[in-house]
Structures are given as C-alpha cells and as structure tokens.
Amino acid sequence: MSADTTQYTTTARLIHWTMAILVIGMIPVGFLMVQKGLDRSFQNFLFISHKNIGVLLLILIFVRLFNRWRSPPALHPVPMAPLQKLAAHMTHVGLYGLLLMMPLAGYIRVRAGGFPIESLDALGIPALVPRSEALAEAAKMVHFYGSYAIAALIVMHIGAACFHGLFLKDGVFSRMWPPVGKKV
Ligand code: HEM
C-alpha cells in the first residue's frame, strides 16, 4: 500500500474543516436564537446567519459527496478491530445523513412556514416547497430532534479523533489534519 492512499486530499480536508467549524457554530447559535427575552435585533442577526450558513452547508454537503465519489476516502493506515471499524462506519454514515437532513429540514421548516431565506431571496431563488403549516411543523420536529442527534455524533466523532491523535498516535488523525495536505 503506498503512503498516499492513507491520506485525505487537500480538497477533502478543506471541505471537512470548513464544514466542521460551521456546523459546530450552528448548534449553539440554533439553540440560542430560539431563547425568549433576547434583544430583537441580535435575535434577527442570529436567525439570518443561521439560515444563510445552513444553506451554505446544504451546498457544501453535496460538494462533499461529489468529491467523495470522485476521489474515494483514504484507506486506514492501521488495521482496526471489526467492532471499532463498525462503530466508526456507523458514526460516519450517521453524520453524513444528519448533515444532509438538518439543512433540508431547516429549509423546509422556513419555506413551508412562509418565512424568508435572505441569501436565496436576494438571488431570486423561489421557495421549492409549498406553503403548509403541517409540513413546516413536521420539519421543525425533525430539525429539533436531529439537532440532539448531530450534537451527540459530533461529540463521539471528536472523542474518537482525539483518542487516535493523542493516545493511539496511529496516523488516523493526521490523515485529516492539518487542513492542507500533500495530495491535491
Ligand atoms: C447543519 C445544519 C444545521 C444545524 C446543525 C442546525 C441546528 C439547529 C439547532 C441546534 C437549532 C435549535 C433547536 C431547534 O429549536 O430546532 C436550530 C433551530 C432552527 N434552525 Fe437550524 N440548523 C441547521 C440548518 C438550518 C437551515 C438550513 C435552516 C433554514 C434555512 C435552519 C433554520 C432553523 C430555524 C428556523 C430554527 C428555529 C426553530 C424553529 O422554529 O424551527 N437551520 N437549528
């Protein structure tokens, strides 16, 4: 196995770390912006940022999936126990699913509820879902429960990454860090 096949490309690393920063920011902002008693203009700022960054994340997850299809993920630098492999695989599948589901549910919640998404409105992109209170309410529930699920998976993912990077030192962490690698 050549050393190169165990490393992620710079493109994959940049997408990974950009999304990581944005998603990790989206969760506290999402919880904060729905709190009662916030200053109105601060709350508006949080809502507008959350919606627009969420749409950017929706685009980025498709870019990421396309890039993953075009250049398959790096091979593991060391053999892993089957259970560990399964846990890593399930976490990653769950994260991809939620990274797709969360922005989609957010989008549907807002558009079906008849609310603006400022960046898309500025570009003249119309709502792609019909106005429906029932649909908006269902999407809101999905978004709400999904936020706990994605937070839990992110904690597991960071925990596993730290375990590899700090204790096992088996090269798994350095496949993705730093954000710029030797492979394009
Ligand atoms: C990965 C992307 C996203 C993450 C991690 C995320 C996370 C969250 C979290 C943690 C909350 C607070 C829990 C709740 O009340 O539901 C929230 C609320 C909310 N999010 Fe997101 N969000 C994402 C994408 C989006 C997008 C793309 C939109 C819309 C374009 C959106 C719109 C909303 C709205 C309107 C709320 C307020 C709750 C409600 O009334 O529905 N989110 N989000």
Image (spheres, helix red, strand yellow):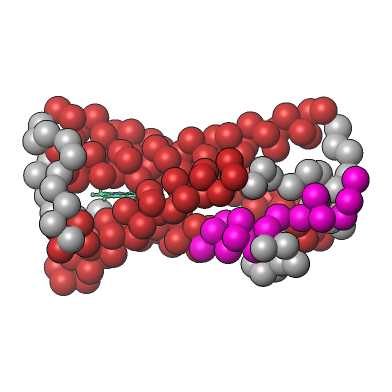
Residue 104 point in image, percent of width and height: 32, 40
**Left or right position of 18 against 75:** left
Residue 141 point in image, percent of width and height: 29, 34
On screen, 43 above or below 151? Answer: below
Count of marks overlaid on the render: 0
Task: Say which of 95 and 137 sits in front.
Answer: 95
Residue drawn at (44%, 53%) of the image: 60
Q: Quadrant of the N terminus?
A: top right
- Residue bounds of the magenta highlight: 1-18
Task: Say which of 78 and 153 sits in front.
Answer: 78
Task: Say which of 93 and 184 sits in front.
Answer: 184
Q: Main secondary structure of the magenta part?
A: helix
Residue 169 point in image, percent of width and height: 87, 57
Q: Is residue 159 visible?
A: yes
Q: In which quarter of the image is the C terminus?
A: bottom right
**Left or right position of 101 against 37:** right
